[in-house]
C-alpha cells in the first residue's frame, strides 16, 4: 500500500479532510478548508499543489 499525505489548504496551510497519494492528479478541484472555511480551486500533479486564481466578479454600475 502506498503512503498517503494530507492535502493542505493553500490559504491557511492547515490540513484539510483529504489525503492524496503520490500518483494523484487533480484538475480544477474545489478544495474546501474546514479551518478557514474557504473554497479554492487547485490543480495537483506529482504532489505539487497549484492554486488557480480566478478574477473576482465586478459589481455592475448603473
Image (cartoon, rainbow, N blue to C red):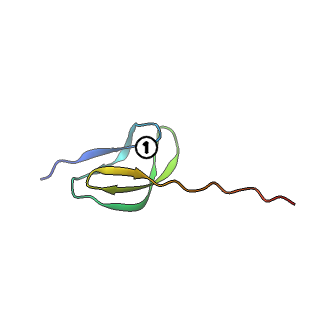
The residue lying toward the viewer, choosing from 55 and 31, is 55
The residue lying toward the viewer, choosing from 11 and 38, is 11
Q: Identify the residue at image location x=63%, y=54%.
A: 56
Q: Which image quarter: residue 29?
A: bottom left
Q: Identify the residue at image location x=46%, y=37%.
A: 12
**As drawn, which residue projects farthest toward the right?**
62
The percent coordinates of residue 1 (x first, y second) are 12, 53
- The residue wearing badge 1 is 10
The percent coordinates of residue 2 (x first, y second) are 14, 52
The residue lying toward the viewer, choosing from 3 and 54, is 54
Q: Identify the residue at image location x=52%, y=45%.
A: 38
What is the quadrant of the C terminus in the image? bottom right
- Check disc 1: other Cα within 10 Å, few if <14, some if 14-19, many if 20+: some
Q: Which image quarter: residue 23?
A: bottom left
The percent coordinates of residue 49 (x first, y second) are 36, 50
**As drawn, which residue projects farthest toward the left?**
1
SS for dot 1: loop
Q: Is residue 8 above or below residue 42?
A: above
State the count of labels: 1
Q: Identify the residue at image location x=71%, y=56%.
A: 58
Give the left or right position of residue 59, taking residue 47 as reference.
Answer: right
Give the left or right position of residue 62, taking residue 6 as reference.
Answer: right
The residue lying toward the viewer, choosing from 15 and 50, is 50
Give the left or right position of residue 27, taking residue 37 as reference.
Answer: left
The percent coordinates of residue 31 (x first, y second) are 44, 52
Q: Is residue 15 above or below residue 25?
A: above
Amino acid at each position: 500500500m502506498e503512503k498517503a499525505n494530507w492535502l493542505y489548504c493553500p490559504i491557511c496551510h492547515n490540513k484539510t479532510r483529504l489525503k492524496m497519494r503520490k500518483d494523484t492528479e487533480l484538475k480544477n478541484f474545489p478544495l474546501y478548508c474546514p479551518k478557514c472555511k474557504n473554497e479554492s480551486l487547485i490543480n495537483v500533479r506529482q504532489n505539487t499543489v497549484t492554486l488557480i486564481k480566478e478574477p473576482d466578479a465586478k459589481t455592475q454600475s448603473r
